[in-house]
C-alpha cells in the first residue's frame, strides 16, 4: 500500500507479519506514517553528502523507532544494487531521527515499532 509520495521518495508500508496483506490504518497512524515519510525525504534532500546523489533506485529498509520517536536501528533488507544508494537510504533514515512519538497502537510491549518499507530515492540535482 502506498502511504505517501513526497519529492522523489515513495514509501509503501505493511505491518511486519502481515504476509503482504493490505493494512488498514487509523487516521492517527496514517498521519504519523506520512510525517515519517516526509521527514526521511527532507533529511535525504538536505544532506550535502554527494555519495549516491547521482543514483536513483529502490532500497528496502527496516527502521526500529522507540516510543520517544528516536531511531534505535536501521537495517538494509534488500539492496538496490548500489552500495552508495543503499548507504544514502540508511543515512537519510538515521538523519531524520527523532520523529514524533509513534501512536501507542504501533508500539510493541518493548516500547518500539518496527517498519519495513521500500524507499525509492530520486537523483539529486
Image (spheres, rainbow, N blue to C red):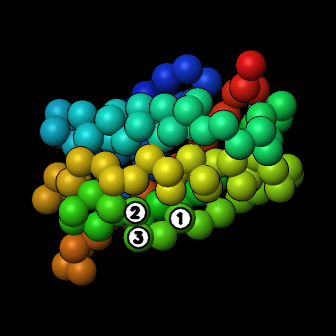
Q: Which residue is mark 2?
A: 71
Q: Which residue is mark 3?
A: 72
**Compared with residue 79, is residue 27 higher up or lower down, i.e. above or below?**
above
Q: Name the secondary structure under disc 2.
A: strand
The quadrant holding residue 120 is top right
Circles 1 and 3: CB atoms closer than 8 Å: no
For residue 100, side relative to residue 120 (left or right): left
Residue at 71 percent across and 42 percent down: it is 49
Q: Which residue is mark 1?
A: 74
Which class describes the residues within 10 Å of circle 2: few (<14), some (14-19), or many (20+)? many
Residue at 66 percent across and 37 percent down: it is 48
Query: Which is more toward the observer, 83 or 19?
Result: 83
**Compared with residue 47, is residue 14 higher up or lower down, i.e. above or below?**
below
Which class describes the residues within 10 Å of circle 3: few (<14), some (14-19), or many (20+)? some
The quadrant holding residue 78 is bottom right
Q: CA distance from mark 1 to mark 3?
A: 7 Å
- List the single residue furthest toward the front: 48
Q: Name the secondary structure under disc 1.
A: strand
Which class describes the residues within 10 Å of circle 1: few (<14), some (14-19), or many (20+)? some
Circles 2 and 3: CB atoms closer than 8 Å: yes
Figure quadrant of the C terminus: top right
Residue 21 percent across, percent down from the top left: 43, 49
Residue at 41 percent across and 37 percent down: it is 39
Circles 1 and 2: CB atoms closer than 8 Å: yes
Amino acid at each position: 500500500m502506498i502511504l505517501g509520495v513526497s519529492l522523489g521518495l515513495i514509501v509503501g508500508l505493511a505491518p511486519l507479519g502481515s504476509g503482504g496483506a493490505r493494512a488498514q490504518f487509523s487516521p492517527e497512524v496514517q498521519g504519523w506514517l506520512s510525517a515519517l515519510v516526509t521527514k526521511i525525504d527532507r533529511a535525504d534532500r538536505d544532506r550535502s553528502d554527494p555519495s549516491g546523489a547521482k543514483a536513483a533506485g529502490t532500497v528496502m529498509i527496516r527502521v526500529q523507532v522507540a516510543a520517544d520517536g528516536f531511531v534505535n536501528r536501521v537495517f538494509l533488507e534488500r539492496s538496490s544494487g548500489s552500495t552508495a544508494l543503499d548507504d544514502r537510504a540508511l543515512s537519510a533514515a538515521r538523519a531524520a531521527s527523532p520523529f514524533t512519538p509513534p501512536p501507542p497502537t504501533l508500539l510493541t510491549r518493548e516500547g518500539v515499532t518496527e517498519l519495513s518499507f521500500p524507499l525509492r530515492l530520486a537523483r539529486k540535482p
